[in-house]
Image (cartoon, grey):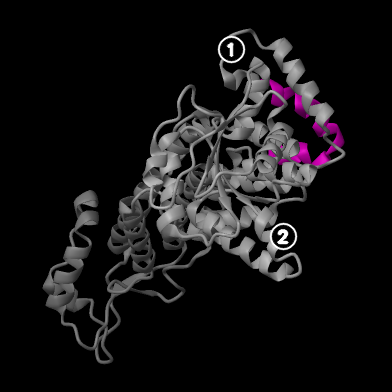
Amino acid sequence: MRGATSMDENTARRLLLVRAFDSAESPLWTADDAAWASRLAAETVPAGAPPLRFLAERAHHALQRIEPRERGAARWLAVGGWRWRWVLAAALLGGLFGLAADVLGRAALVDVLAPPSWAVIVWNLLVYAVLLVGALRPPGKGGVLRRSLLAWWRRAAGKGPLREATAQWAALSAPLTLSRVAALLHVAAAAVGAGLVAGLYLRGLVFDYRAGWQSTFLDAETVHRTLAWLLAPASALTGIAVPDIAAMEALRVTPAAAAPTATAAPWIHLYAAMLGLMVIVPRLLLAVGSLSRAAWQSRHLVLPLDEAYFQGLLRRHRGGVASVRVCPHAAPPGAAAALGLRTLLAQEFGDGVQVQMAEVTRLGDEDLAARPPSGAAPSLQVALVDLGATPETDSHGRFVEALRRAAPAAPLVLLADETAFARRFATLPDRLAERRAAWRQFAQAQGLPLLCADLESPDVAQAAEALKAALQG
């Protein structure tokens, strides 16, 4: 990811929380507060320090004012922290569940052909198969668990800036959260298996279990062959062989036969070994892998610092001037529209903003917009279109892709000038709403923020807020 910087979990959470307050209209955090935090960070960070150092220091100072004013801020920062006691709790709950599960039952006879232990083993094998399929899935394909976690994060969000910070954190930390949840589930599953094994032996101490089997369709030879194959790993580990055909015939339970007298101890050993081999050991290895992956991810969260918000903070810190490249499509803006656009950009980037008006991209020549801009890379690219035009993937879509290729490091905003269309349909507000909706749908499909404004007579304050929201979104 171009312009992305990896950082630890605490730093990322602080940056996102302060960003949410910077972007919100709240009496708890004003523009003067934001300027104070930037000024204090500039005074405490050495010259030439990495950008992340300045941003982290600014977030530290900002939170000194935010936390006393917003009680939920401190709780929000604390709630995402990892607690190792969660692993212990998962192990304890899983162990108690496994211990309480009576897989042998109260009957004196243990059915060696169909003990409930097989259900636990088969379930875990299905889980391994699902994990294997997930590992082979192309990157970026979210699973059910990922979508569920993101939905839960959003429902658990607070109000205002905390809600926005929660949404951003949910998207950023989804891989880390999934690794931690997976670790807890693996620990719990391993503990369930261990609890089952402990339950097998504890009940064997106080009950005298006997082994037998019964079947309408299977004979002793088939049962022997099936169990010898299924229990081969446990037999290799314990050295306990599955009884031969004659012994299996003696264990058969029929209405005419006497009750089996063979002890169930060898079978308990075999099924305990199977639980260890198929459940406990694999789950522990998966838990260790998930915890190791989570530990690495918590130190390498990737936050794109090339976004307009962070670049604006860094530019003001360095005393630089923003450069905005405006790329008109189909027709150039009029003099009044160009002046309104510059006024709008000055509200966000300051009076010193440099506006570079690119050549008009004519219909059919959209691929030519991919030519790199002259001079230094712009801080922002604006794709300027007429709201009255019908958004077309073949033309406007190619135009957007060409601009992305021209300056891949610069954020791109789609600006629809509604001056002419709004005047033409001044008495038909529904037409204006419909056309805005069409461009909004196009922008969403292209993954672009959209700003609609009457550039010749803009409501500067409202348009500036919309531009700020578009850059943050």
- In percent of width and height, residue 270 lies at 28, 59
**Secondary element at image label 2:** helix
Q: Is residue 130 above or below residue 257?
A: above
Say what amino acid the circle numbered 1 marks. Ala
Q: Earlier in the sequence, mark 1 or mark 2?
A: 1
Q: Quadrant of residue 342?
A: top right
Q: Nearer the viewer, residue 406 or 15?
A: 406
- In magenta, the rendered stretch is 57-79
Q: Quadrant of the C terminus?
A: top right
- Around disc 1, counting alpha carbons within 10 Å, would you say few (fewer than 14), some (14 to 19), or many (20 or more)? few
Q: Is residue 423 above or below residue 430?
A: above
Say what amino acid the circle numbered 2 marks. Arg
Q: Which residue sits at x=77%, y=50%? A: 159
Disc marking residue 58: none
- In percent of width and height, residue 278 lies at 32, 55
The chief SS type of the magenta part is helix
Q: CA distance from mark 1 to mark 2?
A: 51 Å
Q: Quadrant of residue 96?
A: bottom right
Residue occupied by mark 2: 423
Disc marking residue 49: 1
Q: Is residue 372 above or below residue 166?
A: above
**Secondary element at image label 1:** loop
